Image (cartoon, helix red, strand yellow):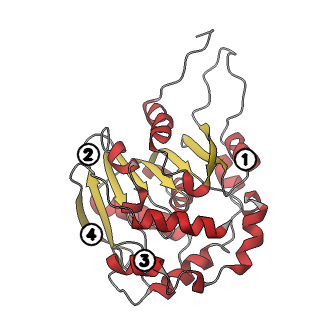
Amino acid sequence: MFRKTLLTALLLIGSPALAQSEPTGDRVEVNGMQMYYEVSGEGDPLIVLHGAYMNIQTMGEIIPRLAQTHRVYALEFQGHGRTNDIDRPVTYQNLADDVAGFMEAVGIEKADIFGYSMGGTAGLQLAIRHPERVDQLIVASVAYDMEGMQPDHIAFLPQLVPEMFVGTPFEDEWRKLAPNPEGYRAHVERLIALEFEPMAWGDDVAAMETPVLIITGDADIATLEHMVAMFRLLGGGVMGDMGVPLPASRLAIMPATSHTAVIGQTDMLMGFIEPFLNGEVPSGMFQ
């Protein structure tokens, strides 16, 4: 299973960049890093957060599609893409604070957030730690508790070692953008350590007031039961057609979709994201 995941990620890394309506790239100092970001489109601000071992390019077509209706700020996290690494653990809390620091640095008071995988989990922590910064949150392929991960994933973690990445085409691609091309092993070691960070945020999720769109594949890294539990913590899972508005949060499940297949299905993602951001609700018989 993990070998297939690596192969899919490698194909993403090696794929050519798609047109992004002339994005503008820049760097800003955030928590001791020179964080790289790109801006494209016009409209309300929307911040895009990539997954682990990824960068802006490997997020694919979703960024230019979102930029058709929003002003998109796509970030590259610590040690990813063109953002330099620093001597600090990669944790979801640190990543969330980096996003908040970025917003402060570039003058964004509040924004919608879309995050995939590691970026989605960082977005979840952003809404927990800095709720005043988040208008609406879209999280794809995330978990809020390690107990919600698929048993196959949990069983594989002890086998995860840097040699799966170091000296492979993953490192070759990473070096093309990295400010310090010799720092790949340290980067990978931090990301492996992230897999073992404690994660049990049920109470924090239940206390959130931010509207959240949860997107998951039906064969994703977290179980479907976990996603439904998260939706219920956010007030979802109630019966409609009872004369009261539906909860602000939503759950979308992509069929026949593994973890790495989520981000490539742009049309389906946009079909979920745009109605959520616009507050659109399908009409029923009693509306």
Kind of residue sitting beneath label 3 = Gly
Q: Which residue does the image show at 42% across and 69% down from the upper left?
A: 77
Pinpoint residue 24: horizontal percent, then vertical percent: 21, 58
Q: Earlier in the sequence, mark 4 or mark 1?
A: 4
253 is higher (above) or lower (below) than 131: above
At mark 2, the secondary structure is loop
The reply to whether the C-beta atoms of the residues labelled 4 and 2 are less than 8 Å apart is no
- Tell which of 104 and 230 is nearer to you: 230
Return the residue at label 2.
41
Which residue is drawn at the image coordinates 32% and 49% (left, top)? 72
The residue wearing badge 4 is: 27
Relative side of 181 to 163, left or right? left
Looking at the image, residue 286 sits to the left or right of residue 81; the answer is right
The label shown at residue 79 is 3
Q: Nearer the viewer, residue 77 or 198?
A: 77
**Circle 3: element type:** loop
Q: Of marks 4 and 3, which one's residue comes earlier in the chain?
A: 4
- Reply above or below: 244 against 162: above
Quadrant of the frame with the N terminus: bottom right
Residue drawn 24% across and 63% down?
Answer: 25
Q: Earlier in the sequence, mark 1 or mark 2?
A: 2
User: Which residue corresponds to mark 1?
Assistant: 224
As shown in the figure, which amino acid type bears the numbered disc 2?
A: Gly
Nearest to N terminus: mark 2 or mark 3: 2
| Residue 61 shows in the view | yes
Amino acid tagged 1: Leu
Mark 2 and mark 3: span between their CA atoms? Answer: 26 Å
Which residue is more in the foreground, 243 or 85? 85
Q: Residues within 10 Å of mark 1 (few under 14, many from 20)?
A: some
